[in-house]
Image (cartoon, helix red, strand yellow):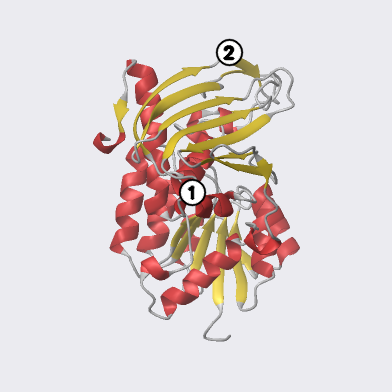
């Protein structure tokens, strides 16, 4: 084994791990897939056979305790992230969390504290990059649009309409305070225009009951429609509309950023329009090298190797980490608190 080899343990290798993370890791030179632990021995063995893991474990704590593992990927749902990630870091191993950071802000704070207590170790949350996100961030940060005055985000679809299927994202016992994909878009907004200073929110769950695959009735505790308004730390005003129960199911995704010198409209896919003040909007042909691709596994392994070389945490090529994650966890907490109390919430007080 080369001194540069990164030995990986994997807990909870679900669909996105099989489609993205495991193939991505397998394609990187010097990465060794050592052990995997899924819900059942049969599932663990199936993953081990498909991706050439050396062995399987029935207990995730045993996997974390192994001396032949350098980094652990946590692919479980958010309800296990706090316990597992803190255990991974305290065991002296680099930590990667799939999907959202954890259940709520109360869990996120000790996760960040543990990460800060181990600055020699890498911590990372899986991003969900949009193709032109980083390009748009650079446009805004360069001042091309001038002082940002308002931000409008609409993410509308029919993903929650099915009354005969219940996903983990609709169960509070697995997702906690997470709401649809609001955490993902909060992460994007934080990077492009910065976080909220204060916000007000309203929540609705029009389909309050569903039937799961076993035929049992399930009470749905995760909101399906969300309206948010507030002021960003930059002073710009922001409004958001999220819905998973749009009857047409065609979906609408749009981020509009208005500044004193120009406007940008991004469809969260491959279409970006920008117009300077007094001029019509026009499509931007973003070159391939400026588009954001899927480099999640490469970024994590690169950061681990940088950490081994003694690189400072702020200079490692990894984002979002737990410090960034807690920003969107604070937003999600504020959304719930505002909806519950009917009052605006200042995020700095959470």
**Left or right, 61 with reference to 126:** left
Estimate how packed mark 1 is, as few (under 14), some (14 to 19) or many (20 or more) residues with alpha carbons within 10 Å: many
**Left or right, 302 with reference to 86:** right
Residue 8 versus residue 127: which sits nearer the camera? 127
| Horizontal and vertical percent position of residue 237 | 40, 30
Residue 21: quadrant of the picture: bottom right
Residue 102: quadrant of the picture: top left
Q: Which residue is found at the position 42% from the left and 33% from the top?
A: 332
| Horizontal and vertical percent position of residue 161 | 68, 20
**Left or right, 118 with reference to 286:** left
- Tell which circle, 1 or 2, labels the residue nearer the N-terminal end: 1
Estimate how packed mark 2 is, as few (under 14), some (14 to 19) or many (20 or more) residues with alpha carbons within 10 Å: few
Quarter holding the N terminus is bottom right
Residue 33 seen in the figure: yes
Residue lying furthest front in this view?
Answer: 278
Residue lying furthest bottom in this view?
Answer: 2
Quarter holding the C terminus is top left
The residue that mark 2 highlights is: 206
Q: Which mark is residue 63?
A: none
Residue lying furthest left in this view?
Answer: 349
| Horizontal and vertical percent position of residue 10 | 57, 59
The residue that mark 1 highlights is: 140
Q: Which residue is found at the position 35% from the left and 62% from the top?
A: 90
**Left or right, 321 with reference to 224:** left
Residue 69 seen in the figure: no
* Distance of label 1 from label 2 (alpha carbons): 36 Å
């Amino acid at each position: 084994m080369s001194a540069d080899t990164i030995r990986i343990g994997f807990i909870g290798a679900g669909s996105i791990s099989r489609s993205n993370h495991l193939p991505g890791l397998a394609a990187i030179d010097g990465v060794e897939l050592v052990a995997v632990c899924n819900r059942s021995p049969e599932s663990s063995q199936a993953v081990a056979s498909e991706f050439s893991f050396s062995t399987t474990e029935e207990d995730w704590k045993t996997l974390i305790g192994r001396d032949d593992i350098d980094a652990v990927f946590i692919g479980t749902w958010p309800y296990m992230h706090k316990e597992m990630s803190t255990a991974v870091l305290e065991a002296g191993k680099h930590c990667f969390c799939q999907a959202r950071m954890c259940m709520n802000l109360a869990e996120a704070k000790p996760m960040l504290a543990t990460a800060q207590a181990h600055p020699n170790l890498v911590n990372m949350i899986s991003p969900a990059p949009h193709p032109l996100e980083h390009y748009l961030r650079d446009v805004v940060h360069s001042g091309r649009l001038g002082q940002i005055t308002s931000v409008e985000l609409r993410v509308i679809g029919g993903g929650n309409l099915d009354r005969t299927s219940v996903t983990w994202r609709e169960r509070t016992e697995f997702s906690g305070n997470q709401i649809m994909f609001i955490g993902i878009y909060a992460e994007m907004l934080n990077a492009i225009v910065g976080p909220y200073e204060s916000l007000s929110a309203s929540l609705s769950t029009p389909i309050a009951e569903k039937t799961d695959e076993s035929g049992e009735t399930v009470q749905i505790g995760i909101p399906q429609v969300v309206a948010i308004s507030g002021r960003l730390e930059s002073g710009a005003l922001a409004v958001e509309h999220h819905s998973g129960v749009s009857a047409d199911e065609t979906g609408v995704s749009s981020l509009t950023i208005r500044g004193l010198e120009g406007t940008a409209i991004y469809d969260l896919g491959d279409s970006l329009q920008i117009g300077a003040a007094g001029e019509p909007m026009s499509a931007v042909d973003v070159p391939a090298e400026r588009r954001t691709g899927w480099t999640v596994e490469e970024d994590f392994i690169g950061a681990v190797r940088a950490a081994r070389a003694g690189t400072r945490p702020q200079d490692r090529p990894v984002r979002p980490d737990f410090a960034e994650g807690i920003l969107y966890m604070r937003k999600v907490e504020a959304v719930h608190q505002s909806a519950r109390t009917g009052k605006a919430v200042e995020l700095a007080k959470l």
